[in-house]
Amino acid sequence: MTPIPIASAAPALPAVRQRYALELLRRFGVVRCHELEFRFGISEATARRDIDAVVRRGYGERVYGGV
């Protein structure tokens, strides 16, 4: 999976992380928690919350490890 570049190495706001997750979902059809953890240096719990936010908006279905 090719990483999608982001503009800053500073801690990203939830909206930025969730847009990134949505972009991964649109491009590749899958988003994994560990991808968000690695990309943004966040905890597993934060990655799960971000993915859950994307799912709540109707963009995917939660499965083991991601969307």
Image (tube, grey):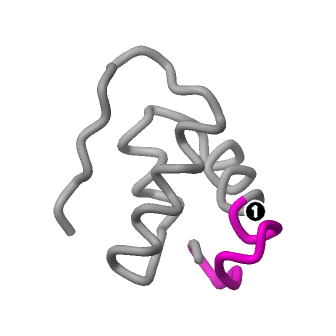
> Where is residue 21 shown, x and y percent of the image?
50, 58
Q: Amino acid at mark 1?
A: Asp
**Residue visible at 57% across and 74% down?**
65
User: What residue lies at 43% left-to-right and 35% top-to-bottom?
Assistant: 40
* Furthest residue toward left: 2
Residue 66 in the image: state x and y as whole percent: 57, 72
Give the crowd class for mark 1: few <14, some 14-19, many >=20 residues within 10 Å: some
Q: Write down the region rendered in magenta.
A: 54-65
Quarter of the image where one finds residue 27: bottom left
Looking at the rendering, which quadrant does residue 1 occupy? bottom left
Tell me which secondary structure the magenta stretch mostly adopts. Answer: loop
Residue 6, how many percent across, how many down?
31, 35
In the image, residue 56 lies at what x, y percent?
A: 82, 68
- Where 61 sits versus 3, above or below? below
The residue wearing badge 1 is 52
| Circle 1: element type | helix
Report the front residue among 16 and 48: 16
The residue at the point 46 percent across, 51 percent down is 20
User: Magenta segment: does it hold 13?
Assistant: no
Residue 60 colored in magenta in the image: yes
Residue 26 found in image quarter = bottom left
